[in-house]
Amino acid sequence: MNLNRLAYFAAVVDTGSFTRAAERLGITKAVVSQQVTQLEQELRTSLLVRTTRRVHPTEAGRMFHARCVMILREAEDAFNELTQAAAEPTGTLRITAPNDYGIAVVIPVVTAFTKRYPGCRVEQTLSDQTMDLTSGKIDMAIRVGWLADSSLQARKIGSFRQLLVGAPAFADRIAATYDPKDLAALPFIANMALREPLLCQFSRSDLERRTVRMQASMGIDTTPGVLAAVRAGGGLSVLPDFLVAEDLASGRLSHALPEWQLPSGGIYTVYPAAQFRPRKVTAFVEMLTAAERNKDSIGDIPGRAP
């Protein structure tokens, strides 16, 4: 089958006329008519009803037109992707990310990205609030945790662990704790940006689980703020591994109950619904994904049970 005939047929349906289809395609009306007729003969099906005033599709034609549109769009996207893949990323990339992950991971990647691709500039919005991607003002978002269902397109590029940590001032009390339920007696800093800031769900096996409701001595609405309070000795809190790895390695923080695990979360790139991604977006995602892989290869968190 000559796939060009799909484009001729789709143009006729879209415009409702052989003449207007020919004008859109930049060819003669006779060629369009001949090619569509040949397509009907190949399919052994009438696709169009022709009248003196207008051309409209048959029932089979409407079904076939929907398929043609998809095929032609995919072909166009494939061509654009191949063209862009060989091109240097340019333009302004607008991204949004949570405060904690943005500071710890995204900003270093953005710095490397702008050095590698000087034709790009990046505008970053760091916020723990979920921003609207349908406005067209943001090219992509990085989201951390557990995604809600939506019409947006998402790709998981990594994962993280939640760790219960505290400052050295609590080291003795942490060491004396063997069961998660004993943690409720310790000062706790609630991250008010979370859906359930006081609820901790621990597991040590498929059968051994504990749900503990902590008693907050203070509440803070940003994760970096919670980390600062933990470092200052305000109490224990649950923080993501990418934010506390260096503190644990240096001994500035201690990992409480390392043999018990809290739920792990995902790291996602999220985009507005579209078939085609600009090269600036795909190039940045490639670098961010590589940074995630490198983070995972560094090794386990100090103090974590094997």
Image (cartoon, helix red, strand yellow):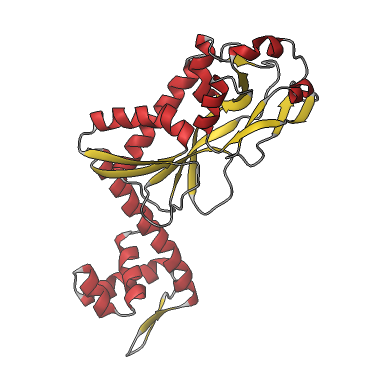
Image position, residue 282 (x, y; %): 35, 39
**Residue plotted at (34% across, 51% down):** 77
* Residue 243 seen in the current view: yes
Q: Quadrant of the C terminus?
A: top right
Image position, residue 55 (x, y; %): 36, 82
- The image shows residue 54, relative to residue 76, as above or below, that is below
Q: Residue furthest right?
A: 207
Q: Is residue 282 left or right of residue 215?
A: left
**Residue plotted at (55% across, 52% down):** 150
| Front residue of 88 and 109 | 109
**Residue plotted at (49% across, 76% down):** 59
* Residue 289 seen in the current view: no
Q: Residue furthest bottom?
A: 52
**Residue plotted at (67% across, 39% down):** 196
- The image shows residue 29, relative to residue 123, as above or below, that is below
Q: Quadrant of the N terminus?
A: bottom left
| Front residue of 69 and 257 | 257
